[in-house]
Structures are given as C-alpha cells and as structure tokens.
Image (spheres, rainbow, N blue to C red):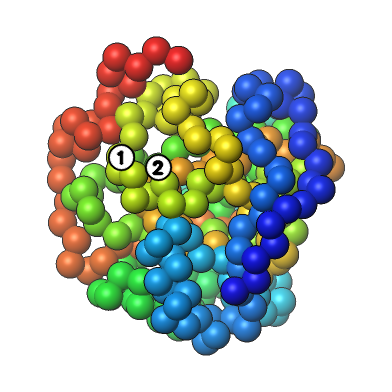
C-alpha cells in the first residue's frame, strides 16, 4: 500500500466559504494511504486494512472511459433531459436564480442529484460494477445492497462544506451494521476544491452524538482534528469507508468543478430500526451538547 505521510497542500480560507466554519477544523498535512491496480488488485491485507482503519483508497478503480460515460449521464440528468427525473438540489445561495442561468451556469449551481440509478443507465453501470461489488462483498462478507445513490457536485466558488459526521447517524440500521460508502471522483478532487477528509480508525470508537448546526453533524470540538487525513483523488479513483468513520469535506473555493458519485451499500442480511431507535443512539438536535 502506498503510504505518503505528508503534503504541501494549500489550506483554504474557511471565512470565504458560503457558510463559514472554524479555521482549524480541517488539516492538510497528511494524505491517505492508497493502492493502485484497480479492484482486482485488492488483497486480503487491504481488506484487513479497511477493517482496522475504516477506509480503503483505490487510485484507479474506474477507467477513463467509464468516468467519461458517467459524466455524460450525470450532465444529461442535470440538464433536465429526463422529464421523470426531479431529484436535483441547488446550492442555497444560487437556487433563486436557477431559471435565469444558461445551461453551464445552471450545472455549476447544482449541489447534488440523487436517486438516479433508475433513471440513467450510465450511472447505474457504476453502481453495479462487478469489480466494485466484489470488493464490497469481501468487506461485508455478505451480498452488498445499494440503498442510497447521490452525485455530489460542490460547484466552483460556491460549493459548501459538508461538516464532520458519521453516515450511520443518517440511516435507520442496527448498530454494528457494516454500511460502506463509496466515493468516486469524476473530476480531480483536491484540497483546494473540497476533497474528502477522514479520521482513520474513528469507526472503532463507536457512535457520536450529532446535532443540527451547519448540518446534521458531529460537534466541531469533538472531532479529533489532529488525526485528519485528506483524500485527494484523480478521476476514477475511489474511497471506501465504514459507516461510523468520521468524515467531511471543506468548501470549494476554486474555479474548478469537484463532481463525484457517492453510493452507500448495506449487507443483504441487515435489519432496519425505527428513527426513534436511531435518535436514541445519535441524539436529537444534539441532546445536551453545547458547542
């Protein structure tokens, strides 16, 4: 496994973000370990690495042809070419002006699209990729079931932060379920344009109380920022992470797009719980948390 330990990545200024956040909330001096060689190169040691550290980065999971096809499918939906597809969310500061924009401006005002696999075969092909599913099955030791699909755009200059959180705080699944998120870069994802940040090993430390501040998130002061690890990716690179891993992404302050697909899978044998049961674990408006 490649093991870069430091980087000279630029630290963006959070005061320029659409919604400002603490200056020291993200670090940029440690880069995630990664492997090359595609999905077929994943070894048992790599699977063990995932379980120990809560993540696995494959630098070249998808070919450039696969990424180009996915981008075409994504733009097709963003441009309104499928009248049955309505699941488009705009950046808050840009939403009111969306009907006055030309097609390119409109694309760059979108924050995310979701529930697209049933509407766009080029995106569904990514979610059902045999190599991807084989890695997930080895991680879960069960058949992976896709239950959430999103495309995260983080548009130039306006792409807002996604605060630190755990994905299982959002899902009504039993505690201990091995939910795996997969984040696939369609453009180059850099420190400056808002690539993913993770806290390796945090999945082992259990659920955290979440609360509504900038989003449904972990308290800023409860994030072990000293362990923050940045995950820059080239197009076709992908990050697998455990549903309890602390992760987030700072704002995009550049003129470059940072488009990505995000997929969540659960084991076929997993069981659902009620929203109240989930809130009993992760909190409701933070319970008594004061940040």
Residues at discs 2 and 1 in contact (Cβ within 8 Å):
yes
Q: Which mark is residue 50?
A: none
**Residue 139 percent location from the top left of the image:** 36, 71
Neighbour class for label 2 at 10 Å: few (<14), some, many (≥20)?
A: many
Q: Which residue in the protein does label 1 denote?
A: 207
Determine the secondary structure under disc 2: loop
Q: Where is 215 relative to 143, above or below?
A: above
Residue 166: numbered disc = 2
Q: Is residue 82 above or below residue 207?
A: below
Image quarter in which the N terminus is found: bottom right
Query: Where does the image place residue 282, in percent across and percent down from the top left?
Result: 28, 33
Tell me if 81 is positioned left or right of 252 in this view: left
Q: Position of residue 5 (x, y in %)?
A: 69, 57
Q: Secondary structure at mark 1?
A: loop
Residue 63 visible in rendering: yes
Residue at image location 48% in from the left, 32% down from the top = 223
Q: Nearer the viewer, residue 215 or 106?
A: 215
Q: Quadrant of residue 97?
A: top right
Distance Cα–Cα, label 2 vs label 1? 8 Å
Which of discs 2 and 1 lies nearer the camera? The answer is 1
Q: Residue at x 43, y 65 (%)?
A: 50
- Seen in the picture, residue 73 relative to 64 is either above or below; the reply is above
Q: Is residue 67 left or right of residue 227?
A: right
Residue at 41% x, 22% y is 212
Q: Residues within 10 Å of mark 1 (few under 14, many from 20)?
A: many
């Amino acid at each position: 496994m490649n093991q870069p330990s430091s980087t000279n990545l630029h630290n963006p200024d959070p005061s320029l973000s659409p919604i400002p956040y603490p200056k020291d909330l993200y670090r940029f001096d440690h880069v995630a370990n990664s492997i090359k060689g595609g999905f077929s190169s994943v070894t048992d040691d790599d699977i063990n690495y995932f379980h120990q550290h809560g993540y696995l980065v494959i630098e070249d999971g998808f070919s450039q042809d696969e990424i180009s096809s996915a981008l075409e499918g994504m733009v097709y939906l963003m441009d309104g070419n499928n009248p049955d597809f309505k699941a488009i969310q705009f950046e808050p500061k840009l939403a009111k002006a969306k009907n006055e924009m030309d097609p390119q401006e409109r694309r760059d005002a979108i924050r995310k699209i979701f529930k697209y696999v049933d509407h766009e075969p080029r995106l569904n092909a990514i979610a059902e990729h045999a190599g991807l599913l084989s890695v997930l099955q080895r991680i879960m030791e069960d058949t992976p079931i896709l239950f959430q699909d999103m495309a995260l755009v983080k548009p130039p200059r306006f792409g807002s932060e996604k605060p630190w959180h755990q994905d299982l705080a959002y899902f009504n699944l039993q505690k201990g379920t091995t939910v795996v998120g997969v984040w696939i870069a369609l453009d180059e994802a850099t420190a400056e344009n808002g690539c993913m940040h993770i806290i390796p090993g945090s999945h082992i430390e259990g659920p955290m109380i979440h609360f509504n501040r900038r989003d449904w998130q972990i308290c800023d002061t409860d994030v072990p920022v000293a362990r923050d690890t940045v995950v820059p990716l080239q197009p076709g690179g992908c990050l697998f992470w455990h549903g309890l891993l602390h992760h987030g992404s700072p704002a995009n302050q550049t003129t470059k797009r940072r488009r990505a697909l995000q997929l969540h899978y659960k084991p076929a044998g997993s069981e659902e719980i009620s929203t109240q049961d989930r809130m009993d674990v992760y909190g409701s408006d933070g319970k008594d948390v004061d940040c």
